[in-house]
Amino acid sequence: MLDEIVLSLGEVFVGRRYADKVIEFAFKRHRKWGSRDRRIFAESIYECVRWWRWFWHLAGLPDSEHNQPEIITPERLWQVWAAYWIINGRDLPKDEDAPEVRPEDVLKRAKEQVEPAVRAAIPDWLEERGSRELGNAWPALRDAMNVPADVFVRVNTLKIDRRTLRERLGQEGFETEIVEDVPSALRLKQRASLFGSAAYKEGLFEVQDAASQLIAPLLQPEPGMRVVDACAGGGGKALHIAALMRNKGRILALDVHAWKLAELRKRASRAGVDVIETREIEGSKTVKRLAQSADRVLLDVPCSGLGVLRRNPDAKWKLSLAEIERLRALQAEILENYSRMVIPGGKLVYATCSILPSENEQQVQAFLVRHGEGWLLEEELHRTPEAGVFDGFYAARLKRVA
């Protein structure tokens, strides 16, 4: 298994692939692995990715080289994994061909004073940006981003209620608890994959973070309305909107990626939703044709994803300041152009899974400055991960003046 761990870490940090996909393909290559082997493998990959810069330091490797793919060799990958293994109190397997990693050296380095970005295993640019935009709130947020997230599900109220779903999952061996202030959410008491469960196959729930489940209700959709989910992706929020509308009305799900819309159609079929129409965005004409056509518009815009690093830890090693600036420009463009789809008197929700004000309230404030007489800010939501329950999300509901 060690060879597979080193190979997979190389795919993440040299091949620049996402960790969840790397793990998925490794499981397909090793179908005979038992549950214990799968757990050890997945934990090794996720923890090494989450704490990459810190374990790189503990292994005694030059910090300046931690994110340079061309010099991340199999030997160095093994050393990083060994540092992870040692710092978790385990004995290294005997392997005469492996580079020497002395436990006493690793433990000594763990006690040394280092820069906050090294200890928190984040890039320097993120430490600077987070500190500048969030000030005194940043240290707690920075620490929270390295705590593995819980698993939440959203009950599909078109088929079942929360109490009954909880009983069904309990019968299948999954203990859950109710999430306060999120009427559609249950939290798993122990992490597990639910995708093979009978309840999932019957479309009784979707896996969705509790904070994400607050966004569709903020839109205030009602049965019979015309709703556009303009950045639909795989459709988690579109499905939630359909449930809130009791599967009555029309939801148009837009996205630039046809494969994501194909996944949404599968999920809608499983959930018993038939009011969602999917449409690929092929250019500006797609949006222009929808001017003043919707009672409600959801803009869950592309963003840095810094609010969900607990779930996608490898994203921090693939992001850059240049990419964040590109995304900010795209967010402003989407808000400017797609807001025209809302009818007078209708409402729009702008949402991100970021914790940066420059992607969140500052975007909304800039929009209102440009269109202050035509739009009103009705409500904002901020959710951050340091409390231990939610991922980082932002959402604002705007009303177009009639």
Image (cartoon, rainbow, N blue to C red):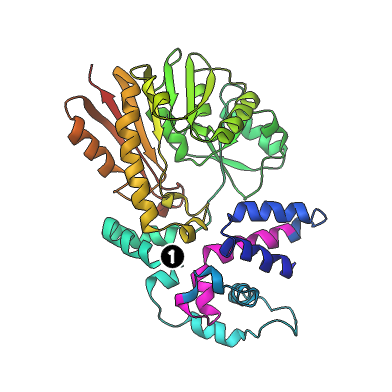
Q: To which quarter of the image does residue 291 belong? A: top left
| Residue with the mark numbered 1 | 122
Q: Where residue 250 sits in the image (x, y, percent)?
A: 48, 16
Residue 238 located left or right of residue 40 = left
* In the rendered image, the vertical position of residue 272 relative to residue 66, given as above or below: above
Q: Where residue 143 sits in the image (x, y, percent)?
A: 42, 62
Q: Residue at x 54, y 82 (%)?
A: 107
Q: Check residue 43 for magenta coloring.
A: yes
Residue 247 located left or right of residue 307 = right
* In the rendered image, the vertical position of residue 388 relative to residue 336, given as above or below: below
Q: Check residue 40 for magenta coloring.
A: yes
Q: Amino acid at mark 1?
A: Ile
Does residue 396 appear in the picture of this structure?
no
Q: Where residue 211 sits in the image (x, y, percent)?
A: 44, 41
Q: Residue at x 64, y 24 (%)?
A: 269
- Quadrant the N terminus occupies: bottom right
Does residue 231 appear in the picture of this structure?
yes
Q: To which quarter of the image does residue 128 belong? A: bottom left
- Quadrant the C terminus occupies: top left
Q: Which residues are magenta?
A: 38-64
**In terms of secondary structure, what is the magenta stretch mainly?**
helix
Q: Where residue 106 sits in the image (x, y, percent)?
A: 56, 82
